[in-house]
Image (cartoon, rainbow, N blue to C red):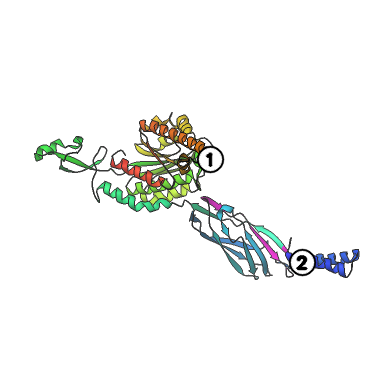
Amino acid sequence: MALTGRAALAALAGVLVVALVAPSWAGVLVVQGLLAVAVAVDVALAAPVGRLRMHRTGDTSVRLGESAGVTLAVANPGPRGLRGWLRDAWPPSAGARPRQHRLDVPAGHTQRLALDLHPTRRGDRTADRVTVRAVGPLGLAARQGTHRVPWTVRVLPAFPSRRHLPALLARLRAIEGRVATLVRGPGTELDSLREYVPGDDVRAIDWRASARRADVMVRTWRPERDRQVLVVLDTGRTSAGRVGDVPRLDAALDAALLLAALAARAGDRVGLVAHDRRLRAYVGYRTRAELLPNLVQAVSRLEPDLVETDMRGLVSAVLRRAGRRSLVVLFSTLDAAPVEEGLLPVLPLLTGRHTVLLASVADPAVEAMAEGRGDAPAVYAAAAAEQTRAERARVTAVLGRLGVVVVHAAPDRLPRAVSDAYLQLKEAGRL
């Protein structure tokens, strides 16, 4: 049972009656008794909420930044009409609006309530419970009860970097020779022969063809298709840091999805591994049609775990799933301590069998701090920023000597930078 504002006003009116008409204990008891009887009658005449039947329809998935619609149908099979309020509880990050609904369901009828969700985080957003207050005919009190009406809306990554895909595909077509030029180099498919021009790699000379043509002929190559690209997400504590309003993991996911879409269009086979202390997600190598839907579903529920990443376990998970030579794109950190203590000891296991690209999210605030000179605190902040940059440059140099391609860019630039690095490797025949 719940009292309404009208009951409070009735109690206040009773106080005035007692004060003006019967200022005695007998008057107080009479007014209280009348009010209690009215409340009891009102509760008895209110429609029972336990008999209500509810079900939901609507969207089951939505991209982050967009809105979803869910409809709650409330059926009243009882003999009395129901008037009151309904509160549909969702997690705050679901952004459910409105929070309350006015109910007016005649006996034997159904009322449908529309709910808009504007999620602010990835993952599954699940409805908690529905609370109903059925107000009596006097409006003094209400029956109250709760119902479980399960519904889950999966919030998928926003994927804003997909706007870069047309330009990247145009560059890919140029590399593959469908638009502009062909490329030459090891590890590619022979496409055709042409006459030698100064600057050509002498290793591309076809001596047999040159003897037949009485001219120096060189081979032109087409990048191979059906290469393997394995995207590896480090979901340990470093991925939980925020750069502006964006978690590092979300920036990595955006870059990973753009790379996967591009590599699939290039005819490569793409897989995904997410790991910290344990394997968090795995998507096997898929065809182009199946790839992005499977990736999006797999990464939508990923959240950083505040533990130190087990790099040895991560590398083992990669080696078990990358059977032949692959491009391993590791989204992790360039901070000195995690790299030197965790990654470097096991990195040769990867670089000995695969081409490795390490992508890291840069914080523009560090660059801004490095420019500060206004006062003593700004100078100290600049010194700290310069030390961070120097350590990162040293780590990058060490990784480069081990054959690792390093990409370090701000969240809005990281997806394009990673995809550009992939195309450069493909153009150089290193995949």
Q: First in sequence, mark 1 or 2: give its number.
A: 2
Which label is found at residue 58? none
Q: Which residue is mark 1?
A: 305
Residue at the spot x=81%, y=66% of the render? Answer: 35
Q: Position of residue 190 (x, y in %)?
A: 22, 42
Give the secondary structure at mark 2: helix
Furthest toward the top, the residue is 345
Which label is found at residue 9? 2
Q: Nearer the viewer, residue 27 or 377?
A: 377
Q: Is residue 356 above or below residue 143?
A: above
Residue at the spot x=66%, y=64% of the render? Answer: 85
Region in magenta: 121-142
Tell me the quarter of the picture where residue 273 sits: top left
* C-alpha distance separating marks 1 and 2: 52 Å
Q: Is residue 174 above or below residue 103?
A: above
Q: Position of residue 418 (x, y in %)?
A: 38, 43
**What is the quadrant of the N terminus in the image?**
bottom right
> Looking at the image, can residue 352 be seen?
no
Q: Is residue 167 above or below residue 43?
A: above
Tell me the quarter of the picture where residue 230 sits: top left
Q: Nearer the viewer, residue 116 or 19?
A: 19
Q: Nearer the viewer, residue 26 or 378?
A: 378
Position of 389 compared to 140: left or right? left
Give the secondary structure at mark 1: loop
Q: Position of residue 260 (x, y in %)?
A: 38, 47
Badge 1, how many Cα within 10 Å: few under 14, some, many 20+?
some
